[in-house]
Amino acid sequence: MTMLAPDDVAPAAPEPEPAAVPVLSIEDAKVTYETPRGEISPVDGVSLHVKPGETLGLVGESGCGKSTLGRLILQLAKADAGTVTFDGEDLTSVSRSRMRALRRTLQVIYQDPRGSLDPKMTIRQIVAEPLKVHGLAKGAARDAKADEMLLSVGLDPQLGDRKPAELSGGQQQRVGIGRALITEPKLIVCDEPVSALDVSVQAQVINLLQDLKERTGVAYLFISHNLAVVRHLSDRVAVMYLGRIVEQGPVHDVFARPLHPYSRGLLASVLRPDADAPERLAEVNEHIHGDVPGFHEVPQGCRFHPRCPYATDRCREEVPELEKATGDHARDHHVACHHWEDIVPLPTALRAR
Ligand code: SF4
């Protein structure tokens, strides 16, 4: 019998890395509002997760429910059903005081920097305010931390004595980012954070967000119309249509090979590097007809069926669930379509570039 020398023994297979516990996990969440015309549910059966240190981009046309989902995470909108678990706690059932405490590690950057900064406060006071609210620093130490944060977001600490109106839009958004980061959050909900800025400033703010993520390990839920920005900044992307997630997966997979007919229409329309989600998809995609119906007239079955060129009787009756795409699309790519496997792939020329 041949004996194996120690060096001949095949090395043991490396232990698989344990899957990271998501910092945010939303399960089957629903948000309903009363309106004069009846109830509407801009978030209806949404499930998604964000892992520590990753960026999940959330895209879709105007009025698809993206911002309501952001408000749900911040508990500015209440869930009628489902759970929103942040850092191990279900936000839908915590007390108000516990929610206030959790906001230290769950922050937000708003779309309109000017509107989100108190015009009467100085820049230093604004950036330092979360430290004061959460009792994390006082007096000179608090001011020193604020100045340090101003430097981190690329602002001269001398601007700390000024008021928001004395700063440009890009500088104001840097202040908003500094205020969100100063408590060392685990997750920041970025709600269209560059759409109010000049195009020339957008790239600087995007690069700053990317750089801060790499330095601090913060995770972002990045809500945006701007598909090019989402592709640049995100690790994974979720596509939302009329209150539901219709596709989600690694950003490269979803942009290179969208599986849902709506994603295909949306992403194939990105033919400019600065492209936004189109106001009317029908105008840029000949295969997709009509407009997004309102939340008062949600279609039965698949919500996309009145606009889908592939709709069948099954689509008109049965709601497609978000399911893992199998075969060569197996890498955490999920889609909610009865027929995604039968739909011919887009010609390369029509794919998002
Ligand atoms: Fe189109 Fe049917 Fe798929 Fe909906 S389920 S996207 S209607 S093919």
Image: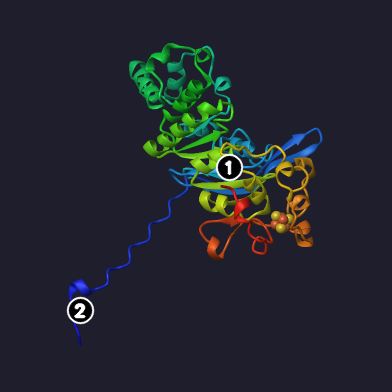
Residue 338 figure quarter:
bottom right
- Between the C-alphas of marks 2 and 1, the distance is 55 Å
Name the mark on residue 4. Answer: 2
Q: Is residue 235 above or below residue 112?
A: below
**Can residue 82 be seen in the rendering of this structure?**
no
Is the residue marked 2 within 8 Å of ligand 1, measured from its CB?
no
Tell me which amino acid carries mark 2. Leu
Q: Is residue 69 above or below residue 97?
A: below
Residue 309 placed where, x, y %? 75, 55
Q: Nearer the viewer, residue 314 or 74?
A: 314
For this view, does 253 lie left or right of residue 316? left
Q: Quadrant of residue 297?
A: top right
Q: Residues within 10 Å of mark 1 (few under 14, many from 20)?
A: many
10 Å crowding of disc 2: few (<14), some (14-19), many (20+): few
Is the N terminus in the top left, top right, bottom left or bottom right quadrant?
Answer: bottom left
Colour convention: rainbow
State which image quarter holds ligand 1.
bottom right
Per the image, the residue denoted by label 1 is 58
Query: Does 225 sit above or below residue 44?
Result: above
Q: Which residue type does callout 1 highlight?
A: Leu
* Percent x, y of residue 51: 47, 47
User: Of 12 and 173, which appears nearest the observer?
Assistant: 173
How many numbered badges does the structure rendering display? Answer: 2
The residue that appears at 53% across and 61% down in the rendered structure is 330
Question: Which badge, 2 or 1, comes first in the chain's sequence?
Answer: 2
Circle on res. 190: none
